[in-house]
Amino acid sequence: MSLPTAQWTVALDRMTETINRNLVELDRHRTEWATVTDSPATVTPPDMLLAWLERRLGQWDARLTASAELAATVEKQLSEREATVARWQETFGRWRELVEQGLNPAPMPASDVPE
């Protein structure tokens, strides 16, 4: 009985091709994400490590500052909308009271009209 070396060879060739493709993809991934995943080597002098850390912290500070500014903008918009809803609620409450009393509600002054 002969061994199926041809089938083994084909299977090994397929495995080799797959491994080579995966290695190429890993190299591409490393290259694209190097700025995020690379950290200084343990033999790096302390002053270079400090510079690297300061650069990374600066990047995070910029992100956090942008996030804080966005959050402040959203808070302001929500406060403005909340104030507008409160004004409308007050206006409709007054109108309802007047209607319940049987009086005709007077038009609101232009300065009191909510946006």
Image: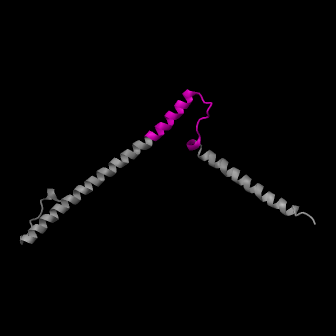
Q: Which residues are magenta?
A: 35-61
Residue 114 appears in the picture as rendered: no
Q: Position of residue 54 (x, y in %)?
A: 49, 33
> In the rendered structure, does residue 37 fall within the stretch colored magenta?
yes
Q: Residue 111, relative to residue 102: is it above or below?
A: above
| Quadrant occupied by the N terminus | bottom right
Q: Position of residue 107 (x, y in %)?
A: 11, 64
Horizontally, residue 12 falls left or right of residue 52, namely right
Horizontally, residue 42 falls left or right of residue 105, namely right
Q: Position of residue 82 (x, y in %)?
A: 25, 56
Q: Residue furthest front?
A: 1
Q: Nearer the viewer, residue 65 or 100?
A: 100
Q: Residue at x 15, y 65 (%)?
A: 93
Number of numbered labels in the structure image = 0
Q: Residue 84, relative to residue 31: is it above or below?
A: below
Instruction: Say how the picture is coloured.
Output: one colour
Horizontally, residue 86 falls left or right of residue 24, namely left
Q: Residue at x 80, y 57 (%)?
A: 13
> In the rendered structure, does residue 53 fall within the stretch colored magenta?
yes
Q: Nearer the viewer, residue 81 or 14?
A: 14
Q: Position of residue 10 (x, y in %)?
A: 82, 61
| Quadrant occupied by the C terminus | bottom left
Q: Residue 64, relative to residue 53: is it above or below?
A: below
Q: Residue at x 69, y 53 (%)?
A: 22
Magenta: main secondary structure equals: helix
Q: Residue furthest right?
A: 1
Q: Residue at x 66, y 49 (%)?
A: 26
Residue 37 appears in the picture as rendered: yes
Q: Quadrant of residue 41?
A: top right
